[in-house]
Image (tube, grey):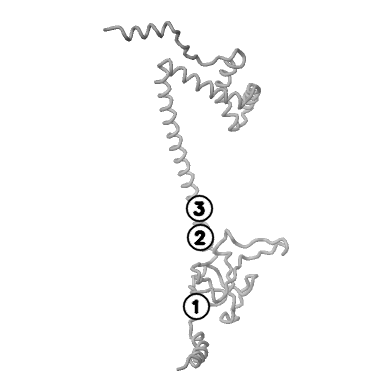
Amino acid sequence: MKAWSAAIVLAMASPAMAQTKEDPLKDSLYGHRVEIMLRSGFGVLGQIVTDTEGSIVKEQDLAKARTILLDMSLEYPELGGRKAIESGGKFIPNIVGFERNQIKSVRRLPDMSPEDVKAREAQREEAYARILAEEASRRKMEAEIESARKKEIEDRLKKKREEEGKTEAGKMQVLAERVQKAAAIYEKYGASAPDTLKAIEGKNLRKQPLSDEDKQLLKDFPEWAWYKANYVDEKPKEPPKEEPKKEEEKKEEKKDEKAPN
């Protein structure tokens, strides 16, 4: 058969092939509650309706509809209908349309009574509350683990400082670190920290809740006061430094090293 004659045969056969292709909506009617699977792989639940107002006219032929409208208000109440100001407060259902050629398969679902809908919503609310409780428990556990980790680090550093503080050089290092930290705290709050502290005390007397900033100042104020007393009100005190040895002392040390045992 020549190429052009084969093309004619295929062209004549294609309408017949299209007619014999099974329609996924052949058993569906307006008003049916269905699950539609799209060719994209996405699935959606809803009731087949006639128009965007959610009407159902069962006499109309669904086979002639190019666009299938689904009212999803019942299936997805969180996305459900809304009151439209422009429509005078009329209820507008949550309706989505799908082109017929997008639909891969359709499955009929059992109809739901108002009691069924209420029971399902109660189950959804219970499941949502359970999820929230589990999430809160997980966050609490994470916070406790993080708090324990920070405490372990702080205890380890504290122990290290205590060991270092037993030597003269260690004491100097500890003092230098405290001065540096206290200076940053003093600079953060400035000279008005006592006034802020009085305001916080007033909140406590009035039983007002304290902000995170207030709580941090209560924690930092002892170091602020220490730095002010030692490095602001009086002449700044620098950490003690090791004085260089005199020439005579160096010579004496060399003699001691050369002396026989």
Q: Quadrant of residue 63?
A: bottom right
Q: Nearer the viewer, residue 41 or 188?
A: 188
Residue at 61% in and 27% down: 188
* Foreground pick, 54 / 97: 97
Judging from the image, what secondary structure is the residue with disc 2 in?
A: helix
> Nearest the camera: 84 or 36?
36
Residue at horizontal 54 percent and vertical 73 percent from the top: 102
Q: Dot 3 lies on which element?
A: helix
Q: Amino acid at mark 2?
A: Arg
Which badge, 2 or 3, comes first in the chain's sequence? 2
Query: Label 3 is placed on what type of residue?
Result: Tyr
Left or right of residue 209: residue 248: left
- Closest to the camera, between mark 2 and mark 1, is 1
Q: Quadrant of residue 74?
A: bottom right
Pair 1/3: label in front: 1
Residue matched to label 3:
128
Quadrant containing the N terminus is bottom left
Residue that extends furthest to the left in the rendered view of this protein: 261
Q: Circle 2 sits on which residue?
A: 120
